[in-house]
């Protein structure tokens, strides 16, 4: 039975720790700067357009969204980070929730950290990676929007990302290249998730 089908459904949006569903099954989460292409990637993975909404305003970024895969496992969409003009209070609330989630979630098998292939690893990405190190959550870098880059430039960015990952003990070395637009890397990512249990 396929993990990723149109049966994947939105379970709930969570704004505080006490709203989390019980951690009684494996889950994976997706993190990334706002506009990195996270909603597009989740929609491409699930094959359901509009399942994950693009949340492009700071006010709508506070929720941790849970989706249920066909075997009952959770796919978790973390709020986008790195808004240029987000109020300090919003950023702090988000950081607190994220810290609590990442450090206390025993069922979390892997975090996917999305990196825009055009921009490479930014300082806010580094902060997330360090938080994942401290929380001992294995994370894997996923380059997004690969279709926007020439092969030569993609190689350069990959090398930069690989170099940055080497500094993070919790980093999984393999980088996944994706394009939600063209479908590149989607099957690979599905297979990686299916293989985690
Ligand atoms: P989010 O804020 O991280 O959820 O980002 P979105 O999924 O809303 O994507 C942000 C912008 O990037 C949108 O205009 C998307 O159409 C575009 N985008 C996302 N993924 C891709 C991709 O793989 N290729 C291209 N060319 N554009 C993409």
Image: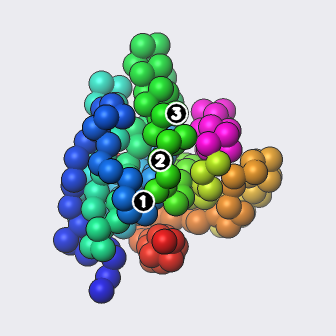
Which mark is drawn over residue 105?
A: 2
Q: Earlier in the sequence, mark 2 or mark 1?
A: 1
Badges 1 and 3: C-beta atoms under 8 Å apart?
Answer: no
Image quarter hosting the N terminus: bottom left
Label 3 sits on residue:
99
Q: Tell me the SS state at disc 2.
A: loop
Looking at the rendered image, the disc whose residue lies closer to the viewer, 2 or 1, is 2
Q: Mark 3 near ligand 1 (CB under 8 Å)? A: no
Highlighted range, magenta: 118-135
In this view of the protein, can residue 85 be seen by the observer?
Answer: no
Q: Residue at x 46, y 56 (%)?
A: 107
Picture layout, residue 197 above or below residue 89: below
Compare residues 102 and 6 and report the one nearer the observer.
Answer: 102
Give the CA distance from mark 1 to mark 3: 17 Å
Picture layout, residue 195 above or below residue 174: below
Q: Residues within 10 Å of mark 3 (few under 14, many from 20)?
A: some
Q: How is the image coloured?
A: rainbow
Badges 2 and 1: C-beta atoms under 8 Å apart?
Answer: yes
Looking at the rendered image, the disc whose residue lies closer to the viewer, 3 or 2, is 2
Picture layout, residue 168 above or below residue 18: below
Label 1 sits on residue:
27
Q: Position of residue 180 (x, y in %)?
A: 41, 63
Q: Position of residue 13 (x, y in %)?
A: 25, 42
């Amino acid at each position: 039975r396929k993990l990723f089908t149109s049966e994947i459904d939105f379970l709930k949006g969570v704004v505080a720790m006490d709203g989390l569903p019980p951690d009684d099954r494996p889950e994976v989460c997706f993190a990334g700067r706002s506009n990195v292409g996270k909603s597009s990637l989740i929609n491409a993975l699930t094959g359901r357009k509009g399942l994950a909404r693009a949340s492009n305003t700071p006010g709508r970024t506070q929720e941790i969204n849970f989706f249920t895969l066909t075997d009952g496992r959770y796919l978790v969409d973390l709020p986008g980070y790195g808004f240029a003009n987000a109020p300090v209070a919003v950023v702090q609330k988000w950081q607190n929730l994220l810290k609590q989630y990442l450090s206390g979630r025993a069922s979390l098998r892997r975090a996917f950290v999305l990196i825009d292939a055009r921009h490479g690893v930014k300082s806010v990405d580094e902060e997330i990676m360090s938080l994942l190190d401290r929380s001992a959550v294995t994370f894997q870098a996923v380059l997004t929007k690969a279709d926007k880059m020439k092969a030569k430039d993609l190689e350069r960015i990959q090398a930069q990302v690989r170099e940055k990952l080497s500094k993070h003990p919790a980093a999984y070395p393999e980088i996944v290249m994706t394009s939600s637009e063209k479908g590149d890397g989607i099957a690979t990512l599905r297979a990686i998730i299916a293989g985690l249990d």
